[in-house]
Image (cartoon, rainbow, N blue to C red):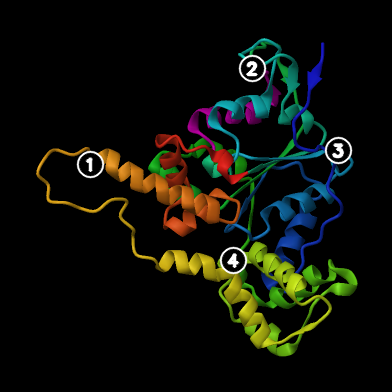
Amino acid sequence: MGVEWSRLSLVSPPPVELIGDSAAIDHVRETIDRLALSAASVLVTGPSGSGKEVVAQRLHQRSRRAAGPFVAINCAAIPRELLESELFGHEAGSFTGATRLRRGRFEAASGGTLFLDEIGDMPTDMQVKLLRILETRVVERVGGGAPLPVDVRLVAATNVDLGAAIVAGTFREDLFYRLNVVRIALPPLADRTADIAPLLEFFAAGAGDTAPRFDESAVAWLTEQPWPGNVRELRNFVERANAFHPGSNVDATGAARLLQAERQPVDRWLAQPVARQRPIAPLSAPIDLKALLDEVEQAYIEQALNMGDGTIAGSARLLGLRRTTLIEKMRCLKIRRAMLD
């Protein structure tokens, strides 16, 4: 019988380092080193783009499981109806299209580390199943009754306030305590400005001989910026600098132009008045107001998905929504998440 593996690579990532000189990053590195001999579950929290997966990779590479696989899955990026099969696998013939046996991420990560990113967006029915697996360390493939023992170290990450999600009834309190054995909190980049200069140097070094050189005025100016996209935004900024100024010096003026050019499309879109899809005429006959509002809402959501940073969180920021709210609106309006791929 053929076996279908996950689309994502199961190869362990190359060695990673947590770049930065701030007290916050020093504390994260120290915490990871203390956890090297532990199998405890870890919850990594922090805003989008702050480096949560880098923390998970370093945890894996410093642990006793470093020789095993590191398997990552984004819980918000997998359609709800496919998430169970992605996590637990399925037997051949268990549903339409399941032509071959497929091992899930838990089986693939056995002997290593499973990283569940955006755990705060996991549907509540899947939270129940995840909790059971954490308690029993046994999975069952979709369509198969045979229990399969798994040996994984679980690292979960979220930028959602799980305390508020528990109160709202969208996240299970018992699962939270199972995941939150050890918590590692990553603050936004704006709160650890000591990390900006070494991160600039690190990202620029990736370009080799063509790397841009940021002078003291540029570094000082960049350190004062808010960086709403955190480390991810800083990395994108350096890539833009490398494209426009390869091997050149970049001063504060040049840095400001680069950052303004990067943000201008989003800023211009946000500054636009709400465009009406059709002129408002005197109400002389009944109208389908819900359909009209859905049409406007769908148009702006689709714009945000196309203009975001490749994540639901980035698109939600453009709309002033919580990520979970945007996901629910996309579900109700039948907007495919594949738009973010």
Q: Do the residues labelled 2 and 3 touch (CB within 8 Å)?
A: no
Q: Mark 1 points at which residue?
A: 289
Q: Mark 2 points at which residue?
A: 142
CA distance for labels 2 and 4: 39 Å
Task: Choose mark 2 or mark 3, whichever is in front.
Answer: 2
Q: Can residue 40 be seen in this view?
A: yes
From the viewer's perspective, tell me whether residue 246 is left or right of residue 228. Answer: right
Asked if the stretch drawn in magenta spans residue 89, the answer is no
CA distance for labels 1 and 4: 40 Å
Q: In which quarter of the image is the C terminus?
A: top right
SS of the residue under disc 2: loop
Q: Can residue 223 be seen in this view?
A: no
SS of the residue under disc 1: helix
247 vs 307: above or below: below
Q: The magenta stretch spans which residues?
A: 122-142
The kind of residue tagged 3 is Gly
CA distance for labels 2 and 1: 42 Å
Mark 4 nearby-residue class (10 Å; few <14, some 14–19, many ≥20): many
The kind of residue tagged 2 is Val
User: In the depicted view, which residue is nearer to us: 148 or 293?
Assistant: 293
Q: Name the residue under label 4.
A: 188
Comes first in the chain, label 2 or label 4:
2
Query: What residue do we see at 80% from left, 77% from top?
Result: 212
Comes first in the chain, label 4 or label 3:
3
CA distance for labels 4 and 3: 31 Å
Q: Name the residue under label 3.
A: 68
